Amino acid sequence: MSALLSVDSLTVRYPLSRGLGEILSGAPRRAIQAVERVSLTLERGETLGLVGESGCGKSTLGRALLRLTAAEAGSVRFDGVEVLALEGPQLLAFRRRAQMIFQDPFASLNPRRTVGATLSEVLHVHKICPAAEIDRKITRLMDIVGLPQELRGRRPGALSGGQCQRVGLARALAVAPELIISDESVSALDVSIQAQILNLFMRLKSEMNLTMIFISHDLGVVRHLCHRVAVMYLGRIVEVGATDEIFASPRHPYTRALLKAIPQMAPDATLAAAPVAGEPPSPIAVPPGCAYHPRCPQAMADCRSGASPGLRPAGEAAVACHLYDGTRGDAPSGDVPAAM
């Protein structure tokens, strides 16, 4: 496989408004650290799971990759082309090849447009097919995602959440993308509908050789769907590796805490008390050193000062943790749930 997407030191910050006192005193403008020097690669046909607590920067990263959110620094190369430098027709051409499916299936659709009009607009704007073939193309797209043809004339308000999400998926597939970024696209759905949409993702992945980034807080779903997993904490990737490796031998203390929080199916299993202690620090005032150190039971002096640790090899994965600086050996992984 060859890399379809290559990200290097991508950074996104949101400047905050300054009060009168700050302006008069000449205080520098503060900013929210949303994504901080993230680097990753994605091979063709691969599905990468992006996980972490709410507010860790997962959605911002996904949007920045598609130029839906402006990046402050870094590089995003798609099929060898620098995405952050694209303008005009070149940017439109990129967006034909890379699509996003959003979390809220209702809010992501125009409430005034019918299913047919929504799909027709995409086909027309991107000049996917001649006007005479649009009707046939819409029929085909609805069949692909399992939408009954009688829904073509309905608006989002007359559809269920699962049906709206299928419309969103059909809209993304209309341009025959090579990359799809799914941002919590099943979290707002009932469990039974989630399973249907996930099975649809898996079928389309196989049939269309899609490359995907699947953003989710549900580790069980990620384990079922993804080849690799990247764990984010406060804007940074703290661990990345093959899904089986991450679940069997998590290295970073934060990854281990997330896995401990997964409910177990065994009748005698108990949920770990406060698997992740405390609350994440404010992204406006990130602590020095490793941002996880105020919550980490294995924090050392190195973790509390200096620069945040970068990703380094640890077994078959890479981890941003001083426990794996090459002098201490592989740190013990601690107790983690058995494979589900």
Image (cartoon, rainbow, N blue to C red):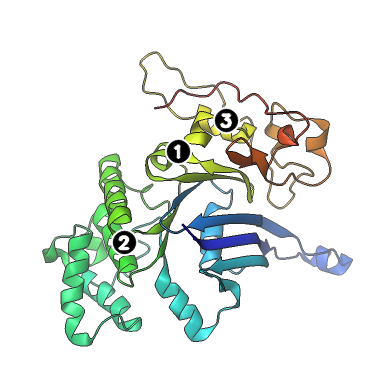
Q: Amino acid at mark 3?
A: Ala
* SS category of the residue bearing label 3: helix
* SS category of the residue bearing label 2: helix
Q: How many marks?
A: 3
Pointer 1 with pointer 2, Cβ within 8 A = no
Alpha carbon of mark 1 to alpha carbon of mark 3: how far? 12 Å
Which mark, by number, is residue 257?
Answer: 3
Q: Residue placed at 38% from the left, 53% from the top?
A: 185
Q: Residues within 10 Å of mark 1 (few under 14, many from 20)?
A: some
Relative placement, left or right, of 59 versus 266 is right
Of the 4 image quadrants, the one containing the C terminus is top left
Pointer 1 with pointer 3, Cβ within 8 A = no
- Sequence-wise, which precedes: disc 1 or disc 2? 2
Visible in this render: residue 3?
yes
Above/below status of 223 relative to 118: above
Q: Residues within 10 Å of mark 2 (few under 14, many from 20)?
A: many
Visible in this render: residue 280?
no
* SS category of the residue bearing label 1: helix
Q: Amino acid at mark 2?
A: Leu
Residue 301 percent across, percent down from the top left: 83, 32
Residue 238 percent across, percent down from the top left: 63, 43
Relative placement, left or right, of 253 versus 242 is right
Determine the residue located farthest toward the top in the rendered image.
268
Which mark, by number, is residue 169?
Answer: 2
- Sequence-wise, which precedes: disc 3 or disc 2? 2
Above/below status of 106 relative to 78: above
Residue 112's image quarter? bottom left
Q: In the image shown, does 18 or 255 lie closer to the viewer?
A: 255
Q: Residue placed at 37% from the left, 62% from the top?
A: 107
Residue that label 1 marks:
219
Q: In the image shown, does 207 or 98 lie closer to the viewer?
A: 207
